[in-house]
């Protein structure tokens, strides 16, 4: 495929504006903590004021970004969640970029971006002050930058590759969940470049892996810079590595059972979503359910299987990569040493489903014709139907949630 592609700037800008408006509408409702905001907002305030260590089981960057939002917009729900909306928009545009760079066609890029925007998981995470939204945005944009480097020439290849490594390092600076994606990016780079010098021209595989590791590792360590200026117990170079070991200990400790816990292999079926919020607030009963759009979540599984079949049978690289990305993103939870699993850990995997769907529709374009448009319409209808319990709109009463409960396990 030629590296000369059309420039879909207008489409990307329009989709980005729509996504940002959607995520930001009524952002401050409810005017109280939602789910893990009870942990991360106070921690962000302490970090923003450089008082001392807090919430030490996670790296600093996600909380730093929450603190920045509070500095810009105030210590209130708008300030807590403002930058999360930008992260959500970054996810949507990152999906657009990955598909455009990978396929060279505008239609699947638009389809994938819209499916990501209409997936409930992206919408909910874009409207809450948690770490996962920032982590996911940096991962998606980092992978897009690495693909951008594949289509570069001269020094642009190195600059874009370096950018991708830095973004993946910043993702790790939000949550360690991003670490496997550095390894996946390196493996994909070696596989794709094997025998194809036109991919990432002028970037030898050994140098590429080295730059990827150094850039991501350096960016990750740089996210700890604020800790060196704490008023109490400031970070030192000598304590930096022991601090990582202490984070690992906290991340892997055995936790008591939780009502919303679920095993990793149940996440693709959306068996046990999480009520982030369900209580009276701002004068009405309101709820926020962390659930994926059923069309995207369940239809995406069919798309992954179809992409895997096309990739293996026809040796088609884009479908195979789309399938393997989702498979790897789920399989890693079988080995990550966490004592409890929760549905929101599936967030990144749910994003890759939008890519698999767009690739599958594009691969079978001649047979499916306008199926992607029909699927987008179905996804939009479901988004509108579930919107009241995604955006904390006013509900009629405490039992109103039952009208959206397709499965008993969703309660």
Image: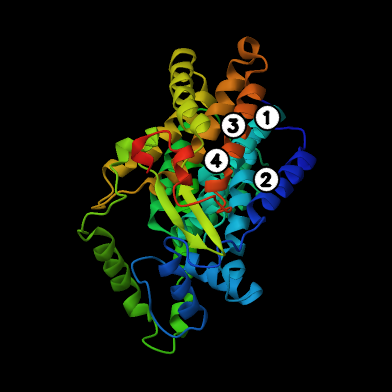
Q: Residue at x 54, y 50 (%)?
A: 396
Compared across the picture, whether 236 is left or right of 362 comes to left
- The answer to which of 56 and 343 lies nearer the viewer is 343
Q: Residues within 10 Å of mark 2 (few under 14, many from 20)?
A: few
N-term-proximal mark, 1 vs 3: 1
Whether tag 4 and tag 1 are in contact, CB under 8 A, the answer is: no
Whether tag 2 and tag 4 are in contact, CB under 8 A, the answer is: no
Disc 4: which residue: 386
Q: Nearer the viewer, mark 4 or mark 1?
A: 4
Q: Position of residue 398 (x, y in %)?
A: 45, 52
Q: Nearer the viewer, mark 2 or mark 4?
A: 4
Q: Residues within 10 Å of mark 1 (few under 14, many from 20)?
A: some
Q: Which mark is residue 68?
A: none
Disc 1: which residue: 104
Disc 3: which residue: 379
Whether tag 2 and tag 3 are in contact, CB under 8 A, the answer is: no
Give the Cα distance between marks 2 and 3. Answer: 42 Å
Whether tag 1 and tag 2 are in contact, CB under 8 A, the answer is: no
Numbered circles on residues, count: 4
Q: Residues within 10 Å of mark 3 (few under 14, many from 20)?
A: many
Res 200 seen here: no
Secondary structure category for the residue under label 2: loop
Disc 2: which residue: 154
The vertical placement of 63 against 160, above or below, is: below
């Amino acid at each position: 495929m030629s590296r000369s592609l059309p420039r879909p700037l207008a489409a990307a800008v329009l989709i980005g504006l729509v996504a940002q408006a959607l995520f930001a509408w009524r952002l401050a409702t409810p005017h109280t903590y939602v789910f893990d905001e009870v942990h991360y907002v106070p921690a962000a305030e302490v970090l923003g004021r450089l008082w001392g260590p807090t919430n030490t089981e996670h790296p600093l960057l996600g909380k730093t970004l929450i603190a920045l939002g509070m500095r810009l917009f105030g210590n209130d729900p708008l300030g807590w969640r403002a930058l999360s909306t930008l992260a959500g928009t970054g996810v949507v545009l990152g999906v657009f970029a990955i598909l455009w760079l990978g396929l060279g066609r505008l239609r699947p890029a638009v389809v994938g971006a819209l499916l990501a925007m209409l997936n409930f998981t992206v919408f909910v995470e874009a409207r809450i002050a948690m770490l996962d939204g920032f982590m996911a945005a940096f991962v998606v944009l980092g992978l897009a930058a690495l693909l951008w480097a594949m289509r570069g020439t001269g020094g642009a290849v190195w600059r874009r590759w370096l950018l991708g490594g830095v973004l993946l390092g910043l993702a790790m600076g939000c949550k360690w969940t991003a670490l496997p994606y550095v390894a996946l990016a390196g493996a994909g780079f070696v596989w794709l470049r094997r025998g194809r010098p036109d991919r990432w021209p002028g970037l030898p595989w050994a140098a590429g892996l080295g730059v990827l590791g150094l850039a991501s590792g350096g960016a990750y360590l740089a996210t700890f810079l604020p800790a060196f200026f704490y008023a109490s117990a400031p970070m030192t170079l000598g304590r930096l590595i022991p601090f990582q070991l202490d984070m690992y200990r906290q991340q892997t400790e055995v936790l008591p059972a939780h009502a919303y816990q679920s095993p990793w292999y149940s996440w693709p079926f959306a068996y046990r979503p999480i009520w982030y919020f369900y209580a009276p607030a701002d004068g009405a009963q309101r709820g926020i359910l962390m659930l994926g759009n059923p069309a995207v979540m369940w239809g995406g599984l069919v798309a992954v299987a179809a992409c895997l079949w096309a990739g293996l049978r026809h040796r088609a690289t884009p479908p195979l990569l789309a399938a393997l990305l989702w498979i790897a993103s789920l399989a890693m939870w079988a080995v990550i040493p966490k004592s409890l699993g929760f549905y929101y850990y599936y967030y990144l995997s749910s994003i890759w489903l939008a890519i698999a769907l767009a690739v599958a529709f594009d691969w079978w374009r001649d047979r499916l014709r306008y199926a992607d448009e029909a699927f987008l319409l179905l996804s939009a209808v479901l988004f509108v139907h579930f919107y009241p319990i995604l955006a904390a709109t006013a509900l009629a009463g405490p039992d109103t949630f039952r009208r959206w409960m397709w499965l008993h396990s969703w309660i």
